[in-house]
Amino acid sequence: MVHILTFCTASQPEIPRHPLELLAAARALSAQLGEGTVHTLCVGPASGAYGEELIHRGADRVLTVECPSVEAEIALAVVESAVRHLAPQVVLLPHDDLSGAYVGPCLAYRLETGIATDCGGFAVQGEDIRWLRPVYGGKAMAYMRIRGPVQLATMRSRAFDPLPADPTRRGEIQSFPADWESVRPQIRVVERLEEKEEGELPLDRAEIIVSGGRGIGSAEGFAVLRELARVLGAAIGGSRPAVDLGWVPHSHLVGQTGKIVAPNLYIAVGISGAAQHIAGAGSSKTIVAINKDSDAPIFKLAHIGVVEEWEKVIPALIEACREWRS
Amino acid sequence: MHIIVCIKQIIDPEVPFHLFRIDPVAKRQIQGTHPLVISTYDEVAVEVALQLKEKVGGRVTALTLGKKEALQALHQTLAMGADDAILLSDLNFEEMDSFGKARVLAAAVRKIGEFDLILCGRQAGDVELGLVGPFLAGELGIPCVPLVANFEVANGTIRMRRPVETGYEILEAPFPLLATITNDTSNVPRYASVKGLRAAMRAPIPCWSSADLGLSADALGPKPLRIEIDELFIPHREMRCELIEGESGAEKARNLAARLKALGLIG
Ligand SMILES: Cc1cc2nc3c(=O)[nH]c(=O)nc-3n(C[C@H](O)[C@H](O)[C@H](O)COP(=O)(O)OP(=O)(O)OC[C@H]3O[C@@H](n4cnc5c(N)ncnc54)[C@H](O)[C@@H]3O)c2cc1C
């Protein structure tokens, strides 16, 4: 029997997609390893409300920890205590800012066990798991072997589709007695600064994303891209230089170290097509590239391309779309 | 304030797909004619260290674990403004996982002695595991603060600024601590001047071996390694890009709009 533990934070009323993807991954893994159970550790103020849905989406048992907020050190302590208590053979965490950069690595250190971060899949042979993950910014892929008392992996978003909800699935929901109250976090958030542009769509739910890179050249240029996004009802994204130059907020970064998105249409403007950027946009159904350099790598990765300076294309594109609207 | 920055030298991560080659037996990238550089986020960490030093005074020491050619990365850090640099190099260091690397770095930090802050890039630009920073914090028993973009000083307190989904978080934690560094508008690395580089080339850089650090081969962790690449390959990508033609930019735009509309993607 192989037990798999997945981790879900519950700080908003609706379950986000990522922990449901983890459950799909856990079920696929469990099926290949032979029968076993999938447990989900659900931590946060909304954990009680998530229980049933997690079971409908593949969990056999949901362990809830209703703490008021999921700070990094509390999350680490709770996950560690669950792993020590349940002794699962496999632990799957989401590869996000909390678990990919903190909980996963710190847990591996404490358990003296290997970890594979940012995994997109796995290959199973007998009891042996090899973890598939991008390396070199996604220019190559690696099957990793990890050794230690537990197989620990953080899974990148969009690698698995959530299983459809099955309301007939039954499972247990119980509260897990983790002693989070005695954790005295050393890292304290003393202030939160909001930095949201009015009316901007979040990247993860957009059907269309208009994304700009260094080639846009200025904040004024980005205002033109935002106009296109408005006309198309699209979200705005950016490459790393666009973020570093302050043209788009960090939360709109697309790529290896930003968001992984999969819209119907991804319009990349003034973006060269570095592997690290495409790592976040490669699952888009259709990628359109607008770049003045016909040799730009993006034209090897896009479905539709326009070789032209964006300044000559985008205003006319806005016009054309506006005409249809009216 | 004594800030230690851990940097890794890697093959230029900006090498495009079509020039990227691997050795599937050695399970690593082939350098070919591509330059060696400081890994992107480690260079950002150097910038963050220098900015903090400019605010509060003190010293920046750059530390790298690598072969002799990694001296070049240390020269660059010195030219950017770091005060000291140390190379950790030994044949024993070449077959290690993130646990072993963290142990070597921790031994070097202990040998250096006093420090207030350690900075590491959020992940290296090659294998991108993002483990050495948190593991090093574990080895030293100090807090690990992930994904910090810079440090602010207000009323004698040093605070960290971290970009998050909704904007920024301002954090406090007791020093000494280790922070992993991410990019934002505030920390685009400065260039090393040619003059600075020339001076840096003359600066003595100590090289510490496993004996200098008092580490036996066994101390570097168990074999087989706990984290290992088993197989490396280049994914197959076949994409034919349909180019939109036109006499002018405006015509291309209209043709593109018509094509996207025909595909049901817009409108
Ligand atoms: C570990 C690591 C992680 C990274 N993570 C990310 C990530 O998450 N996301 C990310 O985006 N990057 C990431 N990067 C950086 C990445 O490697 C590239 O440096 C970056 O994506 C390049 O951004 P860009 O395409 O905007 O800029 P450039 O590569 O400079 O390309 C600009 C393009 O604009 C074109 N252009 C210029 N003027 C015009 C014009 N007038 N009209 C049309 N086109 C024009 C040029 O032809 C060029 O192709 C990462 C790097 C590393 C090492």
Image: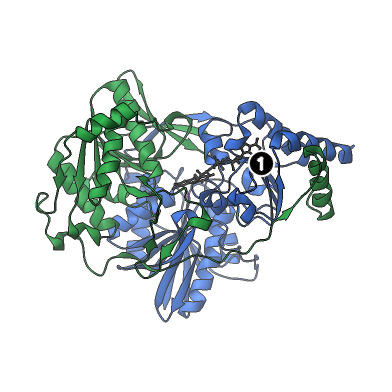
On the picture, is A312 further left or further right than B91? right
- Rendered residue at 16%/35% (across/down): B114
What hue does chain A carry in this figure?
blue
Q: Quadrant of ligand 1?
A: top right
Q: Which residue of the protein is positioned furthest toward the right in this rendering?
A: A326
**Could you tell me if residue A178 is visible in this image?**
no
Q: Which quadrant of the figure has residue B176? A: top left
In the depicted structure, whether residue A124 falls above or below residue B156 = below
B137 or A319: nearer the viewer: A319
Q: Which chain is green?
A: B
Query: Residue A273 appears at what percent x and percent y?
Result: 58, 48
On the picture, is A40 further left or further right than B85? right
In the depicted structure, whether residue A193 falls above or below residue B136 = above
Give the total number of marks visible in the rendering. 1
Label 1: how many residues lie within 10 Å, few (<14), some (14-19) or many (20+)?
Answer: some
B267 or B7: nearer the viewer: B7
Q: Which residue is mark 1?
A: A292
- Rendered residue at 27%/37% (across/down): B75
Query: Residue A24 appears at what percent x and percent y?
Result: 56, 66
